[in-house]
Image: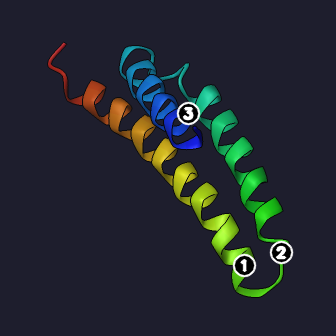
Amino acid sequence: MVIGVVIVACVVLAVLAFLLPRLSRHPQNGAQRGLGAGSRAGSKAPGVIGRLLSKPFSSSSRAVGRSGAAGRRARGRMPF
């Protein structure tokens, strides 16, 4: 379920960044802030378990950031 939500968020952010590059920053930061909170909460577990629990959230945050940046980059390469 979480994987599906992250995929949908990435697609929505990429389309939003392509259509409205300046207005896509705020939703991207909000998504990354929420995933960062999950990562911080997971990392409070002791030892290896903490790293295992926080890793999916940090990689999802990275994916959200990359999809937003890719949409803005694609928009910048358009000839119009």
Amino acid type, mark 2: Ala
- Please rate how many residues cluster around mark 3, counting C-alpha atoms within 10 Å: few if below 14, some from 14 to 19, many from 20: few
The residue where tag 3 is placed is 5
Residue 24 is left or right of residue 15, and the answer is right
Which residue is found at the position 72% from the left and 44% from the top?
33
The answer to which image quadrant residue 21 occupies is top left
Labels 1 and 3: the sequence-earlier one:
3
Q: Is residue 37 left or right of residue 67?
A: right
Q: Residue 32 has which mark? A: none
Q: Position of residue 43 (x, y in %)?
A: 77, 70
As drawn, 16 above or below 32 = above
Give the CA separation, mark 1 to mark 3: 23 Å
The colouring scheme, among rainbow, by chain, secondary structure or one colour, is: rainbow
Q: Is mark 3 on a helix, strand or loop?
A: helix
Residue 54 x, y percent position in the rendering: 68, 65
In which quadrant of the rendered image does the C terminus lie? top left
Query: Which dot marks residue 45?
Result: 2
Identify the residue position indicated by label 1 in the image.
49
Between residue 70 and residue 53, name the one nearer to us: 53
Q: Distance between the residues labelled 2 and 3?
A: 24 Å
Relative image position of residue 25 (x, y in whole percent): 57, 30
Q: Is mark 2 on a helix, strand or loop?
A: loop
Instruction: Give the vertical position of 22 relative to 66 (above or below).
Output: above
